[in-house]
Amino acid sequence: MADMLNTAVSGLLSFQRALATTSHNIANVNTEGFSRQSVEINANTPTSMGNSFMGTGAHVESIQRSYDQFLSTEVRDVTTVHSRLTKFAELAGHIDDVLADPQGGISPALHDLFSSIQDVADDPSSSTARSAMVSSAQSLSERFHNIGNRFEQLADNTRTEIGAVVDEINAIVSAISNFNASIQQINGSSSATQHSGDLLDRRDGLLTQLAEKVDISVVYSADNSMSIFIGNGQSMLNGTTINTLSVQPNASDPEQDAIVYNGTVGEFDLSAHLQGGELGGLLNFKSALLTTARNSLGRTAIGVAEAVNSQMHEGMDLNGNLGQDLFSYTEPQIFNATSNTGSGQVTGQITDIGALTANDYNLIYNGTNWTITSDTGTTATVTHGSVFEGITLNISGTANMGDYFTLKPTLAGAESLNVVQTDPRLIAAAAPIRTSHSLSNLGDANISTGTVKDSTELLTGTSIPSVNFSFTSATSFISDAAVQTGGVTYAASTAIPYSEEMQIEANGWQVTLNGVPAAGDQFDVQSNLGGIGDNRNALKLANLQNQLILNGGTTSFQGDYGTFVGFVGSQTQAANVSSEAHALLLDQAVSRNAAVVGVNLDEEAADLIRFQQAYQAAAQVISAVQNMFDTLLQSTR
């Protein structure tokens, strides 16, 4: 009878544990990350009775946690990709919103500037038109400032968010380490299976949170602890041993931060190898879109400034002076690496806006030569005075092998664009020279109005010298100053053979003679002082709007800006589409995993009834044993 009682009690206790586990499942049906637990009941070791064995009841072997490593890994992997795309799409949307504003964008301001320049060309002596042109230039500058400053603020916010995500990664890894220690501590105890199941669920929840932040690989150990790897296989966690990440200033580029891995063998930059999760999205956004956006906007600003300034130099203002810069901007930003040991210094100037790109550059000295390499991979060996992609490099001092510089030619172009000429009289609407012919000329030859070839050669001292052409015959003439034609330079008063459509250059200008001259005919080229009604240079300024100047002479200002806006829009749209697609993939992965590990209330209700009936049956056995004992005791009285 004692054996029957022990057997009944073992069943009672086993089914009590099964009921408790079922109740635990039901209580956590809405607990995020909870995995269904089930009781594994096995028979006790039977006892020998003569030639046979007698069963001795049952015991709870373990409490199993529903788990599928493949499905869990799939959920983490898809979570990592979805998190990266979602973060990228969110941040790209900020840039797209700024550029898509039809009122606050650059295109309307550019149109207003060139429209005001055309008004000056229509009436070059009008102070009202000139003032409106200055105002339009200032409005364009402010528009570039506003967008550039918003991009800069977005860059600062992104850097702050990167630091916050790195701190979260370190905190999550530390929490997982604590769970590893707890799981290892309770393994082997009587309550290990129940407790470790809940701890494993909570640890898996932290793994999913970590996967949202960064791409990870997980390796499990036999004792239920785990190791976590990131990047190129760098260990963040090995059991309870933690390695951390930190954000440190980039040694060669203060605009960028380095994500540094603090391992047992030292520190090194992992930024280029962190592709997934929020951190990957932030890093990808900053390098692939934000920096490109800032550089592209800066290039457009610099392109407008350089083209307008260059054309202003080829004109004359109302004071009779050659035109000066209308805009100013910051020269290329160049940063030397903190690890440089030599005294080498590098500066640069933008000298060819047609060749200017939106790239950043690395300049490295190998002990013999300087090598410059762009973000897109274009490279060249350079020396002092070399021109590479529109930038003239000035290299001085003594560099040591390995010295390193980072060049950002257009990064600050938008924020630094300013109007430096605010006096309407200083707008160079007129051409600096004018041509004329003698009223006593007998031939039908004529001279063109002239164009400026090199504004730096126009002045001799403080004035533009006059030049006279006097024909000695219908086939020859002399000049009272040295001139060049057909590649040949002729000194003053030297006979120059005449030909139809001949081009003559002197003092930075060029004129064309045409027609049939007669002996004694004279032509003059002189300063355009007093030419307040002249609009020739204003027309050239207005024509800059449609000229193909940027991208090697293939794109106008509006076209370049439109391409840039289109690029941002397409990147944003692609990110949104990919994010939505991966949201569906994530839902499917979560559903597949939940079908295996989730709590099904119908199943739990059936188990509850089954275990309750078994529990009641075991109790009935105990009651029967008690009746048997009572009968036995009464029969002995």
Image (cartoon, grey):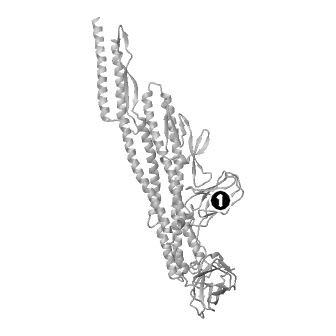
What residue appears at the point 41 percent right and 48 percent down from the top-left corner?
Answer: 582
Residue 29 appears anywhere in the view: no
Q: Vertical placement of 159 versus 238: above or below?
A: below
Q: Which of 598 and 27 lies nearest the eye of the viewer? A: 598
Q: Position of residue 218 (x, y in %)?
A: 49, 37
Residue position marked by numbered label 1 in the rendering: 382
Q: Is residue 233 left or right of residue 192?
A: right
**Where is residue 58, by image quadrant?**
top left
Which quadrant holds the C terminus? Answer: top left
The answer to whether residue 340 is left or right of residue 294 is right
**Type of amino acid under label 1:** Val
Point 42% across, 29% down: residue: 194
Q: Is residue 42 above or below residue 198?
A: above
Residue 626 image point, x, y percent: 30, 14
Q: What is the tally of numbered marks visible in this picture?
A: 1
Residue 8 lies, with reference to residue 251, above or below; the image says above
In the image, taking residue 577 as reference, residue 510 lies left or right, namely right
Q: Is residue 204 above or below residue 127?
A: above
Single out the residue that lies furthest toward the top: 636
Q: Is residue 37 visible?
A: yes
Element assignment for label 1: strand
Residue 103 location, x and y as percent? 44, 67
Question: Which residue is drawn at the image coordinates 41% and 38% (left, top)?
Answer: 71
Viewer-nearest residue: 237 or 476? 476
x then y, percent, for residue 434: 59, 84
On-image quarter of the N terminus: top left
| Badge 1 density bin: few <14, some 14–19, many ≥20, Cα 10 Å | some
